[in-house]
Amino acid sequence: MPSWRTTLTRAGISAPGLRDDYTRAARGVLRRDPARFVTLRLLAAPPLVPWLAAGLAFMNLVDDVAETGTPQQRSAGLAALAARTGAALEGGDSPDPLLRAYAHAVRSRELPAHWVTRFLDGAATAEAGFDGFGTEEDFQAYLDAYAWPGVLVFTGLQYPGGPDAAQAAGWRAFVDAAQRVDFLADLSGDLAEGRLCIPRARLAEHSVTRADLERARDTPAVRALLRAECRRARTALDAADDGILDLTEPGLRPVVAAMTELMGHQLTAVERAGARLLRKDVGYGLVAPAGTLVRALRRRAL
């Protein structure tokens, strides 16, 4: 793995100020999401790493603002962030080094600005005002408004000129699977924070109430509901895994393969947990990520 300085140089980032901006953005990602950053550094082609690190830093920033404080604070914070981001994208400058780095990445890679605007709009509506899903259609609308553009403001930087229609659709399928797995794995923690991420219509189909889930009731109806949700997640993951690598730039394929493999590990753990999902979130653990990383490094070395 080349040094960070060499990585910046290989990406064509030579101006001292910009190099410092990208370094600050990368450090922020390392602090907040060390596993994802290390995976990116070890597995992605070096010329892609600074762009993607800046994209990941921006995605994390928007997520954090959308999830912090009262609804009024979230709304005000996101409006201010949208204004600062728009100014950075239009003028190329900002007092925030993260936004300077991200604006430079968007400009350099020619990522269509509508993905950024769509993500910020979705953060202010679908995420900041989240109150659960009534139906599957509501879940799909959430993906379209927030989760899908949120992934593309990051992964879209791999493509010069931004993703084409087929590539964008492939990431839409990936997001569908990832969100279902995340919602199941984080079910206990979300419920503790007052978030129910399983559509209410599906609770009704199984005669399960929100109180059943909040009180971690291990009943046949609850177990049937969770099994059905796991089947939906497994179907979505299989669909995402079918062809996503063909739609990914070669320099990022090892990262995406590792991400998909880890999602599969996590979903298997979720399936095994059953009703215990209601008492404790399901993480990746240590063994699965380490094994995935070692295998990915070996494949890359071949």
Image (cartoon, rainbow, N blue to C red):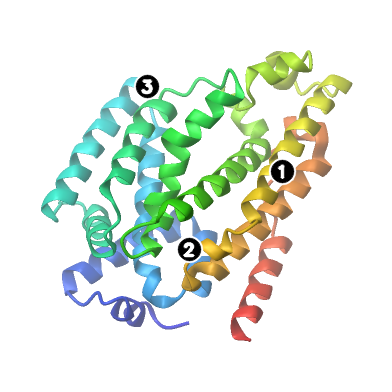
Give the amino acid type for the residue marked by disc 1 in the picture: Thr
Spatial CA distance of label 1 from label 2 is: 28 Å
On screen, residue 264 versus residue 274, left or right, reads left
Residue 151 x %, y %: 45, 49
According to the picture, the residue beneath numbered tag 2 turns out to be 37
Residue 134 rendering spot, x and y as whole percentages? 58, 17
x and y percent of residue 137 in the render? 56, 25
When the figure is inspected, residue 141 is found, relative to residue 14, above or below; the finding is above
Instruction: Rate crowding at label 3 as few (under 14), some (14 to 19) or many (20 or more) other CA atoms within 10 Å.
Output: some
Q: Mark 3 — residue?
A: 71
Tell me which amino acid carries mark 3.
Answer: Pro
Q: 155 or 197: nearer the eye?
A: 155
Which residue is rendered at x = 81% and y = 40% of the image?
273
Identify the secondary structure beneath mark 3: helix
The answer to whether residue 216 is visible is yes
Q: Residues within 10 Å of mark 2 (few under 14, many from 20)?
A: many
Q: Label 1 belongs to which residue?
A: 235
Upstream in sequence: badge 1 or badge 2? 2
Q: Residue at x 80, y 33 (%)?
A: 227
**Disc 2, SS:** helix
Give the farthest residue toward the front. 165
Quarter of image, res 127: top left
| N-terminal-most mark, 1 or 3 | 3
Q: Distance from label 1 to label 3 (Cα)?
A: 34 Å
The residue sitting at 68% across, 16% down in the picture is: 210
Which element is circle 1 on?
helix
